[in-house]
Each structure stands twice: as structure tokens, then as C-alpha cells.
Amino acid sequence: NRGIESPQRYILQIFWTTLEDHTVGFRGSPAFAEWRAIVGPFFASPPVVEHFELVAKSA
């Protein structure tokens, strides 16, 4: 998603089954290095990574 007020900012939201699926499974895999090599040049600065817990599903 691209910001409206700040169109140079984007939010990438990925839903992992578990935190470890991201922190261990993906980040420790060759796919992470490949993904980072593809998208890395587009980062203006290192990305901010935060993990959230879903508290409610929309109807």
C-alpha cells in the first residue's frame, strides 16, 4: 500500500502463520536473500519491521 499523504512511503503487510515462519523460516532461507536483492535497491532507508497480532476479523 502506498501512502496518500506521503506517496514515497509504502506498507507491505504479510500474514505469517507463526512468528517463527517469518523470523526463522523465511529470514533464514535462500528466498530471503533473493527477495532482498530484488527489492533492496528500492529502499530509501532500511525498512522498519514490526510484528502484529490479529485481534479481530472483519465481517
Image (spheres, grey):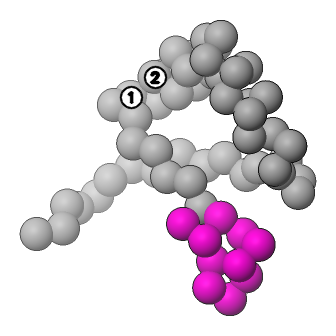
Residue where numbered disc 1 is placed:
18
Report helix, strand or loop for mark 1.
loop
What residue lies at 55% left-to-right and 20% top-to-bottom?
Answer: 26
- Above-or-below relation of 5 to 35: below
- Above-or-below relation of 51 to 9: above
Quadrant holding the N terminus: bottom right
Residue 43 belongs to magenta span? no
Callouts 1 and 2 close, C-beta under 8 Å: yes
Residue furthest to the bottom: 5
Report helix, strand or loop for mark 2.
helix
In this rendering, position of residue 45 left or right of residue 13 = right
Where does residue 17 sit, x and y in percent of width and height? 33, 31
Where does residue 40 sit, x and y in percent of width and height? 81, 39
User: Callout 2, which amino acid?
Assistant: Asp
In the rendered image, which quarter is residue 15 located in? top left
- Above-or-below relation of 51 to 35: below
Where does residue 20 sit, x and y in percent of width and height? 48, 22
Where does residue 8 sit, x and y in percent of width and height? 76, 72
The Cα–Cα distance between marks 1 and 2, rounded to whole angstroms, is: 5 Å
Highlighted range, magenta: 1-10
Label 2 environment density (alpha carbons within 10 Å; few <14, some 14–19, many ≥20): few
In this rendering, position of residue 38 left or right of residue 28 = right
In this rendering, position of residue 34 left or right of residue 50 = right
- Above-or-below relation of 52 to 36: below
